[in-house]
Image (cartoon, helix red, strand yellow):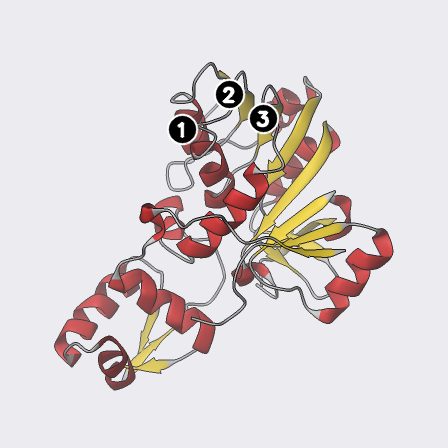
């Protein structure tokens, strides 16, 4: 079942700067010339070249003669760089998920920017228990009223701001939580879930197997994204939240499995 669920309001921190908008425009439309971007944003070509240079230096975009395009998806971006991409959609997804989380719930929260946004906005919830390997989500949970926060031990992946590995899998296996909240690197055409590292898949599966209800959070960039490590399937989540309708093949698979798909925002391309 596909349900439309628009947020009641838009948060101020969901407004992207020009560089984030450039990155999102290239993601939606593919290769863009410097002239096209300068015209669209009503700035000089020199200004756009500076923006493109910085985005390319950070690995978010790739410069090409006369313009810019998306880089080859051989690895995931850093947490900080992913934070600025498609931020309004991630906020919409997080707000929709929040409405499905009751007070006093125990949550297992995976790596990724969208799960962290969910935790950050749990400010009106009380008596929450948060179990997470997402360092930014743990820090956000520490600011919540009456929240209990649990994290595993181990070495932090500095760029991703998280922990993975056998100890993290064992950490999640110790608990049976009410809701598991996780993202994914990509979704294949057959509904298979994809990530960039085997450890990420195993930890995500540990969360799913040890929760009573599984929430999968997907912004539109994840459909068809070429992450290369396969593990799990979209139908294994109880509810899928996204800002975009899935491809027809995935929608049919979800419908046959009786899973809910919550459409969280506008489907108009930026």
Q: CA distance from mark 3 to mark 2?
A: 9 Å
Question: What is the secondary structure assignment of the residue under circle 2?
Answer: loop
Residue 164, percent from left and from top: 54, 33
Question: What is the secondary structure assignment of the residue under circle 3?
Answer: helix
Q: Are marks 3 and 1 in contact (CB under 8 Å)?
A: no
Q: Mark 2 packing: few (<14 Cα in 10 Å), some, or many (20+)?
A: some
Residue ID for mark 3: 168
Q: Residue, x 46% and y 72% (percent of image)?
A: 28
Mark number, residue 43:
none
Q: Mark 3 packing: few (<14 Cα in 10 Å), some, or many (20+)?
A: many
- Above or below residue 67? Residue 9 is above
Q: Residue, x 13% and y 76% (percent of image)?
A: 46
In the image, 78 versus 8, the foreground residue is: 8
Q: Quadrant of residue 157?
A: top left
Q: Residue extending furthest right?
A: 256
Q: Are marks 1 and 2 in contact (CB under 8 Å)?
A: no
Q: Mark 1 packing: few (<14 Cα in 10 Å), some, or many (20+)?
A: some
Which quadrant is home to the C terminus?
Answer: bottom left
Residue ID for mark 1: 140
Mark number, residue 151:
2
Looking at the image, is mark 3 or mark 2 earlier in the sequence?
2
Q: CA distance from mark 1 to mark 2?
A: 13 Å
Looking at the image, is mark 1 or mark 2 earlier in the sequence?
1
Q: CA distance from mark 3 to mark 1?
A: 19 Å
Question: What is the secondary structure assignment of the residue under circle 1?
Answer: helix
Q: Quadrant of residue 189?
A: bottom right
Q: Nearer the viewer, mark 3 or mark 2?
A: 2
Residue 51, percent from left and from top: 21, 67
Q: Is residue 113 left or right of residue 254?
A: left
């Amino acid at each position: 079942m596909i349900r439309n669920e628009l947020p009641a309001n838009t948060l101020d921190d969901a407004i992207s700067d020009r560089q984030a908008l450039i990155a999102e425009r290239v993601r939606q439309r593919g290769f863009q010339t410097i002239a096209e971007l300068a015209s669209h944003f009503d700035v000089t070509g020199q200004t756009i070249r500076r923006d493109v240079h910085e985005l390319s230096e950070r690995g978010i975009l790739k410069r090409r003669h006369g313009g810019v395009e998306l880089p080859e998806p051989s690895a995931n971006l850093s947490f900080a760089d992913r934070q600025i991409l498609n931020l309004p959609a991630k906020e919409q997804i997080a707000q929709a998920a929040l409405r499905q989380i009751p007070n006093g719930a125990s949550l297992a929260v995976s790596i990724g920017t969208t799960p962290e946004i969910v935790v950050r906005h749990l400010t009106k919830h009380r008596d929450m228990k948060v179990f997470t390997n997402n360092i930014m989500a743990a820090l956000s949970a520490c600011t919540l009223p009456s929240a209990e926060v649990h994290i595993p031990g181990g070495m932090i992946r500095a760029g991703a701001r998280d922990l993975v590995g056998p100890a993290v899998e064992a950490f999640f296996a110790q608990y049976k939580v009410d809701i598991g909240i996780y993202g994914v690197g990509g979704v294949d055409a057959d509904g298979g879930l994809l990530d960039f590292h085997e450890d990420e898949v195993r930890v995500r599966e540990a969360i799913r197997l040890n929760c009573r209800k599984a929430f999968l959070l997907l912004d539109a960039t994840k459909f068809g994204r070429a992450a290369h490590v396969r593990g799990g399937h979209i139908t294994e989540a109880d509810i899928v939240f996204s800002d975009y309708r899935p491809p027809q093949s995935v929608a049919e698979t979800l419908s046959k499995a009786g899973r809910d798909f919550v459409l969280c925002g506008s489907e108009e391309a930026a």
